Image (tube, grey):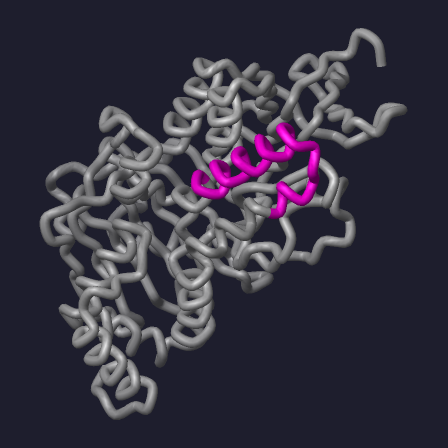
Amino acid sequence: MAGIETFDAVVVGGGPAGATAADDLARRGRATLLLDRAGRIKPCGGAIPPALIREFQIPESLLVARVTSARMVAPSGRRVDMPIDGGFVGMVDREHFDEWLRERAAASGAVRRAGVFERLERDPDGTAVVCYRGRDGREGRVRARAVIGADGANSAVARQAMPRAEEVPCVFAYHEIIRSPGGGSADFDGARCDVYYQGWLSPDFYAWIFPHGETTSVGVGSASKGFSLRGAVESLRAATGLAATDTVRREGAPIPLHPRRRWDNGRDVLLAGDAAGVVAPASGEGIYYAMAGGRFAAEAADAFLATGDPRALAAARKRFMKAHGRVFFILGMMQRFWYSSDRRRERFVAICRDPDVQTLTWQAYMHKKLVRAKPVAHVRIFFKDLAHLMGLASP
């Protein structure tokens, strides 16, 4: 293997998880290669909470819009507004946001390289060799003491390094980035996210209209095979007066429904982001959790590089689940129950009218912590939810 480049860590995938991991490792003085497939943009509503902006030092110049409310639309057409009291959710365009993260990693010392991961080999002493196809079509090969797979829900790194890993069920998401309508559009608000819980738009998830300043994301998700995501977006655009608006680009991708049970191969490979399955159930939120997972992966990889003990890699999942596992469990239960029929979706939107629900939902989303400070509110919500579950409350 004489003459082959050697890195402490090779990060495969330059989305929020991979770019964050590469940045953190480079800042820790580790020789890091960030291998990213050029031109890939993930379909995403683009919402980032204040916790992300604060924890990952995101400049406000990257925010293309500030959302101050959400509107939930029930199967009946009932609309429930959920204003954010005294705050906002930042909106980003993934095309520019992800590139900024990659540039930051490079500025911290990571080597950026465009290429598609192909396979993982081993040199005679057992060190991992990452084989990839460059933009010029030629094969490249680099040695890596540690490999972080942040290459999406259908992670090729996971399939290579962890062939017995479980298959993670996915929601398939599709959206169209369109030019935002002008001021004459009566039903569009550039400071509001619209979420549609209607079976004709998605039988098991939801559809959305999220403003991005000059552009807007119109999308839908579903795990139902054979359901036409493009047809649903076309219908949503037609129903909301957005059919004639110019389309900038179209994107689609699978989104995992729950974290993998294992994120490392017990040797030198670790997963992060969608590859690890860290997308919040029910909401589909992924940017914050991808970056949090990328940071935990970097810290675990750094500990492994320092000690040579592969058991250090398992700390990434343990720390993530300790911080966010309870939220993921609750959201997963919500999705399985409330999204299962239009009747239940109607009641779910009705629950969202409650001021206690709105306050606690926004506090948990904005700060990424379950709120414990209002026990009386939690008790009220419990009994209201119980009434809806038993059909004793009007939808």
Residue 364 % position (x, y): 28, 57
Residue 185 % position (x, y): 15, 45
Relative height, residue 101 to residue 216 (above, below): above
Locate residue 95: give its quadrant. Answer: top left
Relative height, residue 263 to residue 98 (above, below): below
Residue at image point 86% right, 25% down: 125
Residue at image point 41% right, 68% down: 330
Q: Is residue 108 magenta?
A: no
Residue at image point 74% right, 40% down: 267
Q: Which residues are magenta?
A: 291-314
Quadrant showing the C terminus: bottom left
Which residue occupies the foreground of this view, 265 or 258?
Answer: 265
Which residue occupies the foreground of this view, 29 or 356?
Answer: 29
Residue at image point 73% right, 18% down: 142
Q: Which residue is outermost to the right? A: 124
Q: Is residue 329 left or right of residue 303?
A: left
Q: Which residue is outermost to the top? A: 3
Residue 206 % position (x, y): 39, 60
SS assignment for the magenta stretch, majority: helix
Q: Is residue 138 left or right of residue 200?
A: right
